[in-house]
């Protein structure tokens, strides 16, 4: 079984990537959808106990946030894959401004997550990590994470 952890600031394409790549076969765990950490953890436990593949579609910009999921997934014998969304702040702000209603994150929230961004490491418990960006054709480009990669969001 696989646990996928998204790592990226608001407006970096996480939910869109989930819909394109994982919607058919994975459950989405998102604090935006579930509203509270308690509900999120209950949902996570259900996935772990039933061996259901899942994606954590939160910002997870801090190692402490990622640690809410990785140790539990590893204990349940899940393979843990990270996707780092390499997004320039200006691009994330532009995408965020195109959202509607409750989906719009206040500018200060996007900037705050950008400033907090901590690059992930395999030492956190990831089995593999990928870097993800959006090209000129508005398509996702996924590359293996290499030591020394420095996504714009982490600069």
Image: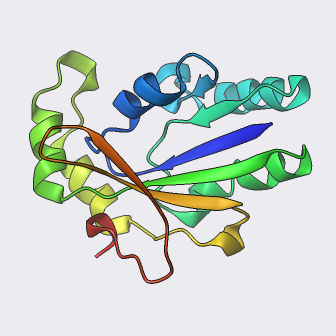
Residue 112, image x and y in percent?
28, 58
Q: Is residue 52 left or right of residue 6?
A: right
Q: Where, by quadrant of the figure, is residue 34 drawn?
A: top right
Q: Kindly identify the residue that appears in the image at 84 percent across and 32 percent down.
A: 48
Q: Residue at x 57, y 65 (%)?
A: 63
Count of number-bearing discs: 0
Q: Is residue 46 above or below residue 57?
A: above
Quadrant placement of the C terminus: bottom left
Q: Quadrant of the N terminus?
A: top right
Question: Which residue shows up at 54% across the image and 68% down it?
Answer: 120
State left or right for residue 90 relative to residue 13.
left
Residue 59 x/y as whole percent:
44, 47
Residue 19 vs residue 72: left or right? left
Seen from this angle, which residue lies furthest bottom?
148
Residue 77, placed above or below residue 144? above
Give above or below for 28 relative to 122.
above
Asked which colour scheme the image uses, the reply is rainbow
Q: 91 or 127: nearer the eye?
A: 127
On screen, 127 above or below 21?
Answer: below
In the picture, measured across the screen, residue 117 lies left or right of residue 63, that is left
Quarter of the view holding residue 44 = top right
């Amino acid at each position: 079984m696989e646990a996928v952890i998204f790592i990226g600031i608001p407006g970096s394409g996480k939910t869109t990537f989930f819909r394109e790549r994982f919607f058919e076969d994975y459950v989405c765990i998102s604090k935006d959808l579930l509203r509270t950490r308690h509900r999120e953890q209950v949902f996570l436990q259900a996935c772990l106990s039933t061996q259901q593949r899942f994606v954590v579609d939160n910002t997870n910009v801090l190692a402490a946030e990622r640690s809410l999921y990785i140790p539990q997934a590893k204990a349940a014998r899940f393979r843990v894959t990270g996707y780092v969304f390499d997004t320039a702040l200006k691009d994330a702000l532009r995408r965020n401004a195109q959202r509607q209603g409750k989906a719009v994150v206040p500018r200060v929230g996007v900037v705050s997550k950008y400033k907090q961004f901590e690059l992930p490491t395999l030492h956190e418990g990831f089995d593999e990590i990928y870097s993800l960006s959006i090209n000129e054709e508005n398509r996702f480009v996924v590359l293996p994470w290499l030591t020394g990669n420095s996504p714009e969001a982490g600069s």
